[in-house]
Image: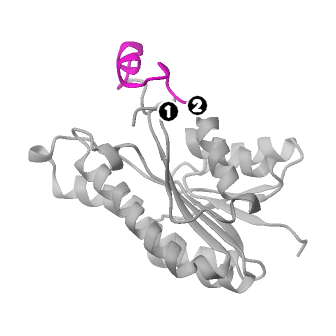
Amino acid sequence: MENKTYALVTGGSGAIGTAISQALAHSGYHVYIHANENIKAAQVLVHQLQQSGLSAGAIQFDVNNPDQARHVLEELTEQTPIQLLVNNAGINDDVIFPAMRQDQWQNVINVSLNGFFNVTQPLIMPMIRSRFGRIVSISSIAAIMGNRGQVNYAAAKAALHGASKSLSLELASRNITVNVVAPGIITSPMIDNVFDEKAINNLVPMKRAGKPEEVASLVDYLCSRKASYITGQVISVNGGII
């Protein structure tokens, strides 16, 4: 195998995932762009990156299926470790808590929190053996401030904060950092019908939504060797909301 650093971005074909995948590829890493149902979008992104002379590949598995995730990831790391992991996969299913169904609670928890375990745990030992690693999980401002209608989503993302802080302590002596990036209102199809210009002006001191690239640039930095002394942190990208 060539001497290249390998990265994995789960949910890598969404708005933020795409920007992160592009940033890491431009930094010279080989980026595995993960998708489950939307594998075609991941393959299109891979093709675009390759056309630009960058290194990328698409992989498909369900982060909520531990056996499937482990099988794919163990095959992937047989010859070379994945040293950069961005846990970006997540879903939301918003409803006020009194009306929330059990499956709405469980599905959101499964993808964001159980998905974190199912993807991260199989990659840890290869990362430890390579004596280098970066783990970045994408959270949300909802996990810090709370948000009406998102008790399930806020719970799942807030759990990543505690998990990441604890894991950072376990891995700190191994040259592996573990951090969380918590975006605020970021331009994407998810917010188009939620926040209009007036709402954004009222909520965000910078008076605009953030760009996916602004989240990606922080993730790219945290994945670099320049960020070797930053671990166990939750860093917000939110235009000054808090």
Q: Any mark on residue 2, and which?
A: none
The image position of residue 175, as x and y in percent, is 68, 76
Quarter in which the C terminus is drawn: top left
Secondary structure type for disc 2 = loop
Residue at 72% of width from left, 75% of height from top?
132
The image position of residue 35, as x and y in percent, is 57, 55
Q: Any mark on residue 186, and which?
A: 1
> Going by the image, does 100 lie left or right of 219?
left
Secondary structure type for disc 1 = loop
| Residue 123 seen from this side | no
| Residue 182 seen from this side | yes
Amino acid identity at mark 2: Lys
- Measured in 3D between alpha carbons, the distance from the residue under mark 2 to the one under mark 1, in whole angstroms, is 6 Å
Residue that sits furthest to the front in the current view: 229
Determine which residue is flagged by label 2: 211
Q: Is residue 104 magenta?
A: no
